[in-house]
Amino acid sequence: MTLLKIARMGQPVLLKSAAVIADPTSKQVEELLDDMVETMEDAVGVGLAAPQVYEGKRAIIFKSPRERGGEDGADTDFSPLTALINPEFEPVTDELTLGWEGCLSIPGITGAVPRYSHIVYRGYLPNGQAVEREATNFHARVVQHEIDHLDGVLFPMRMTDLSLLSFNEELKAFMDYATVHVAGSSVDKEG
């Protein structure tokens, strides 16, 4: 396995739609996913899309660990480390939740992004098996964020209020301020 360089905002590969992968079981896809896992873990992330490592292919990895949502969360709130090829999703409800997001391609910055709180996603596992799962809360947020990367969308492009964008060093003070003073900001501190 190899640590890969992470593309940062401004790199054109992050603004393009990624190509469908014809054979999810190919050796090249397996090697790419293994390298993506190593890269994500090294960067202490919870998700990574192939375009973030300069590969314009429709592949993502993600996890939604129990530590992110507490023991009382629904099973759909959590996911082990998952590799998904040619993923897509659809919302189960129209409910959007505003939550804080960061991105390995935009280091040092966090923003409040509206996302569907309950989705169904589909795709293929590296063994070629089709998968369909429900996801809620943080799990749903991570999947949507990574699929956005496959469509050339970065989280600030989804933001509806750029006053809810902050440097990480200022985030705790900013979150406290924003939840009280920024009009209409009911921001989920977990997301």
Image (cartoon, rainbow, N blue to C red):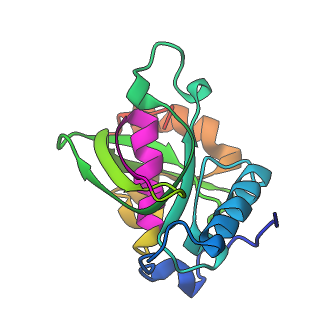
Taken as a whole, is the magenta stretch helix, strand or loop? helix
- Which residue is most to the bottom? 12
Taking the spot 63% from the left edge, 79% from the top edge, the residue there is 54
The image position of residue 135, as x and y in percent, is 37, 38
Where is the N terminus found, in terms of image quarters? bottom right
Q: Is residue 165 left or right of residue 153?
A: right
- Does 105 appear above or below 101? below
Q: Nearer the viewer, residue 181 or 156?
A: 156
Nearest the viewer among 25 and 78 is 25
- Residue appearing at x 58%, y 70% in the figure: 50
Residue 8 visible in the picture: no
x and y percentages locating residue 18 in the rendered image: 45, 78
Residues rendered magenta in the picture: 129-149
Residue 147 lies within the magenta run: yes
What residue is at 40 percent from the left and 21 percent from the top?
Answer: 74
In the rendered image, residue 109 lying in the magenta stretch gets the answer no
| Direction from residue 179 to residue 37 in the image, left or right | right
Q: Position of residue 15 (x, y in %)?
A: 47, 81
Tell me the quarter of the picture where residue 139 sits: top left
